Amino acid sequence: MSARALTILALSVLTLSAMSMSVSRVVAAGEKHVVSQKGKSFSVTELHVKVGDVVEFKNDDDVSHNVFSVSKIQPFNTKMQTPGSEAAVIFTNEGTVEVRCAIHPGMRLKIQVAK
Ligand SMILES: [Cu+2]
């Protein structure tokens, strides 16, 4: 292998390791909060998170749920969640996010996202 090829190889390895480092830094930056769904209700009615945090919606119920946001600042829809499944959402904007379940209108959760 020529010296030039070795240099290119070394640079590629450096670039790749730099990339994976920045990815893990992004993941580590946000705190993870778990919201359980049980008895056709959320485990909390209000949750305070920071921009970049992850909320994991966990279906601990024996029925399916479909969690979604009605707030324009952070639209999301976990789609149908069967019992035992979980879906993670990263909150990227500051403000209040109202969360509902498409199947059970009585399920309500307010997520306050701060900087
Ligand atoms: Cu539901």
Image: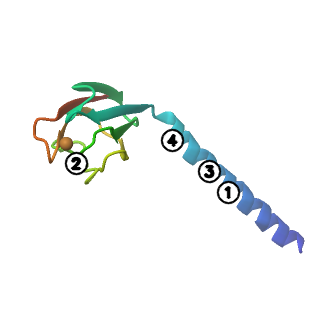
One can see residue 51 in this view: yes
Q: Residue at x 28, y 26 (%)?
A: 47
Graded by Cα atoms within 10 Å as few (under 14), some (14 to 19) or many (20 or more), the crowding at tag 3 reads few
Q: Name the disc covering residue 66, or none.
A: 2
Q: Residue at x 10, y 40 (%)?
A: 105
Q: Name the disc covering residue 27, or none.
A: 4
Question: Marks 2/4: CA distance?
Answer: 25 Å
Q: Name the disc covering residue 15, or none.
A: 1
Q: Amino acid at mark 2?
A: Asn
Q: Is residue 86 left or right of residue 29?
A: left
Question: Marks 3/4: CA distance?
Answer: 11 Å
In this view, the residue farthest toward the front is 62
Question: Where is residue 45 drawn, in percent x and y?
Answer: 21, 26
Q: Secondary structure at mark 4?
A: helix
Is tag 3's residue or tag 4's residue first in the polypeptide sequence? Answer: 3
Q: Nearer the viewer, mark 2 or mark 3?
A: 2
Question: Marks 1/2: CA distance?
Answer: 40 Å
Disc 2 C-beta below 8 A from ligand 1: yes
Disc 4 C-beta below 8 A from ligand 1: no
Q: Nearer the viewer, residue 37 or 47?
A: 37
In this view, the residue farthest toward the bottom is 1
Q: Secondary structure at mark 1?
A: helix
Q: Amino acid at mark 1?
A: Thr
Q: Residue at x 25, y 48 (%)?
A: 76
